[in-house]
Image (cartoon, rainbow, N blue to C red):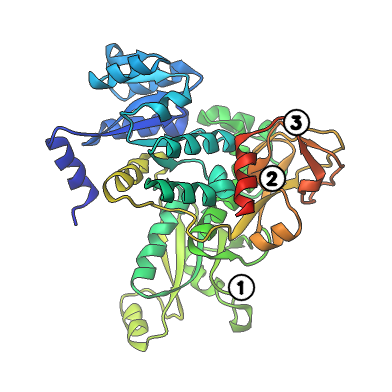
Amino acid sequence: MLGINRKLANFEKSGSYIKVGLVGAGQMGRGMISQIESMKGMRVVITADLAINNVKNAYENAGIDRANIVETDELEKACAAVSQDKVIATKDSKLVTALSEVDVVVDATGVPNIGAEIAWDSILNNKHIVMLNVEADVTVGPLLKKMADASGVVYTGSAGDEPGALMELYDFADAMGFEIVALGKGKNNPLNLESNPDVTAQEAEQKGSSPKMLASFQDGTKTMVEMNCVANATGFAPDQPGMHGFEGSVADLPGIFIEKDKGGKLNGRRVVDFVNGVAPGVFAIIASDKDEVNAEMKYLKMGDGPNYVLYRPYHLTSLETPLSIAKAYFDNEPTIAPHYGLQGETVAVAKKDLAEGDYLDGIGGYSVYGKLYKAEEAERNHALPIGLVDSNVKLKNAVKKGDVITYDDVEQTKESTIWKLRALQDKQ
């Protein structure tokens, strides 16, 4: 089987290229456009963002002449532009999903409700959809995958995101017949459950990032959501609510991820977790019951067993997304998808004391953070998924700091796509 690089090169030689539609020209989207312009056999032909100058700047920074950037929200003009090998800047995300020339859509918005809408529209328009929106995936991904499968298109997470990088390790080890004991990632910063946009404002300005996005990393929500995604894809689960968050180096990992009665720190196997001290990498803890395999692993300097660590010390975020685009287009396969349905649920926890009548403000804000539970435990407690939280959700009851917010505690003041899809998913 040809590698993706050769498939893309051959595709370009034949006079064709994969036509990509992108929604979201923030940091992730901009990097992806530039990376794709360096590749063969692929191009981002249309990008939508409410800040239209972000789109134009992204294309120009990628080396595209301004004369070849067409600003329009009209379908006919967009079709004509693509036929002339020009690219489109638009404010209308629905133009991206409706444009017949687009083969694969990428959601890089990071907003759960918008991501759910984009995925839904893409599938209805028979387009593959690549999600750089793990928050939407862990909330309604199982339903979207079923829809995509029924429509003959691919629903997938992205290579380069930590879940996608972990899935590569999982597939590698699983294909060879190793037992996979645990899957995990390093956390890039100390856990601060009270982090909010005020706390991260200065750092965000220095990095050119969103204060809310940085807060979602610091308060642990992003880590919970990412490992939730891995759990849904592999059938693994958190060993305890919120996972352990062990401290250790890469060399320590095989000894940490052993059951407590055998000298380690786990309650069971087939778990997802995170570790402080190995960032920015991802890892798989593997084992074998075969003497010959263990002897060879020792010979290969993989350690003395019984556990071994596979470690990938990098993930290139949206710069790797084109690999998922190509895999969906050429091979009709996802990089990572919720094959096991909901195995985990990242639920909303009060970041401070919240009063009756308060409105919640979403991921990385001032009111809530996410905590990963086993799905059945979250369902039993009627816990509210973090992906359903936004500024249209109002508290009917006061909730104390550190308490899980339940469906019974909230009401929707404005209907949203992701709530509708989640209700449909829960009925299946």
Vertical relation: 193 (above or below) 390: below
The answer to whether 157 appears left or right of 351 in the picture is left
**Residue drawn at point x = 58 percent, y = 38 percent:** 112
Give the CA separation, mark 3 to mark 2. 21 Å
Task: State how many labels appear.
Answer: 3
Please, what is the three-letter code of the amino acid marked with disc 2? Tyr
Q: Which residue matches tag 2?
A: 369
SS of the residue under disc 1? loop
Tell which circle, 3 or 2, labels the residue nearer the N-terminal end: 2
Q: Nearer the viewer, mark 3 or mark 2?
A: 3
Q: Position of residue 274 (x, y in %)?
A: 56, 58
Q: Which residue matches tag 1?
A: 266
Q: Nearer the viewer, mark 1 or mark 3?
A: 3
Q: Is residue 426 visible?
A: yes
Q: Position of residue 62 (x, y in %)?
A: 31, 25
The answer to whether 46 appears left or right of 361 in the picture is left
Crowd around label 3: few <14 · some 14–19 · many ≥20 (10 Å): few
Please, what is the three-letter code of the amino acid marked with disc 3? Thr
Q: Which residue matches tag 3?
A: 413
Tell which circle, 1 or 3, labels the residue nearer the N-terminal end: 1
SS of the residue under disc 3? loop
Foreground residue among 28 and 46: 46
Tell which circle, 2 or 1, labels the residue nearer the N-terminal end: 1
